[in-house]
Image (cartoon, helix red, strand yellow):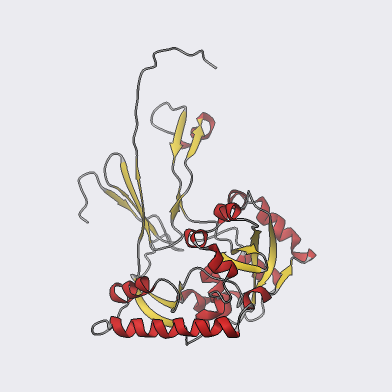
Amino acid sequence: MQQGANSKEQVPAAGPAGAPVLASAERDMVWILGQPQLEDYLEFQKNKVIREGTCDLRACAAEWRAANDLYYDLEQSEAGLAEQIDCRPLPPELMPLAREVEAHRWFQSSFDDLPYSFELVELDKLVISQLQVETGYSRRIAELLGAAPPPEALFRFCLPLEREFPPYRVRRLSSTRFQFTSYSSDFREHRPTLLDQDQLAALALPNPAVAMVGVPIGFGSNLLSGIRSGQRVLLQNGYHRAYALRSAGFTHAWCVVETVTRKDELRLTADEDVIADPEFYFAARRPPLLKDFFDPRLARHFRARRSEFVVEVEISIRTSGALDVTPDR
């Protein structure tokens, strides 16, 4: 897109030496076949997968159909497997780390309305709603953690309080429109925030100001988390870390598990796909599980073009005169 006269672009994400870090336009990823929607998979094959020659959509649909048939067989042979997930409580020696996480503002803003617990959950039997992940991250896990990391290291890896933000771009499209983009699927807007006069003092604004409304743009809390309903745990956040840990040979991971007992509670924490069809994830005989990423009959690996996630903010201001004067507070 050609930039207009008022357009400005920034790339604030930086590497260790302060130089901008731009993610590759390509990525290695794995996709689980046989789950809705077939249309999404064919669209991905047609527009995103990097290959030599043309895309044979009929062949792609056939392999998806074969995986879908296999899921029918798994509903018979592995019915109830999701209910057998091994979840272990937090040991006393890790309690100080959990309290540190609870005191952090990121945790408090994300887990403020439902009961939760810190648990060591079995990776293979986590129910999943996200059917594709990038695989490149898993190659660095063995180097970061080692084959047998101490419990504290694994806990901090799963529930970190510091993070490197993925690369992002900021463009000013006009005097009232701003565009924010990132390759990360975790990129999002947060709730608008009202800053008072004391909070503005550190900003050194060019004009006298008593208040400011801001829309924070950024990422999620980056904590590996799940949702429990009955005996099942659905992986809510941390898919890439969960996949990477499983790829490196780990069987369990630390997770913040929120418990829901009704649909109104589910709406507070789950993503749109889960909210739209909770029975599929929490009541189906054999829902998709994290272990399916490692079943060659169900999963396919691809080199694909990245998608860019965009948040656009447009400012609208209305100023009017009051007819009745209200007393100063």
Using the image, determine if residue 111 lies above or below residue 282: above
Q: Quadrant of the C terminus?
A: top right
Up-down: is 133 above or below 328?
below
**Nearest the eye: 165 or 262:** 262
Front-lying residue, 163 or 68: 68
Residue 221: name its quadrant.
bottom right
Residue 226: x and y in percent read 60, 64
Q: Is residue 320 left or right of residue 218?
A: left
Instruction: Determine the residue positioned at 63% across, 51% down.
Output: 104
On the question of residue 9 being in view, the answer is yes
Quarter occupied by residue 128: bottom right
User: Which residue occupies 44% across, 40% down?
Assistant: 214
Judge whether residue 85 can be spotted in this image. no
From the top left corner, tell me how far across and down residue 312 is, in percent: 35, 49
Q: Quadrant of the N terminus?
A: bottom left
| Residue at 26% across, 85% down | 52
On the image, the x and y values in percent for residue 2 come to 20, 54
Image side of residue 266 versus residue 67, left or right? right
Q: Where residue 50 sits in the image (x, y, percent)? A: 30, 79
Vertical relation: 277 (above or below) 172: below
Q: Which residue is at the front of the view, 81 or 19?
A: 81
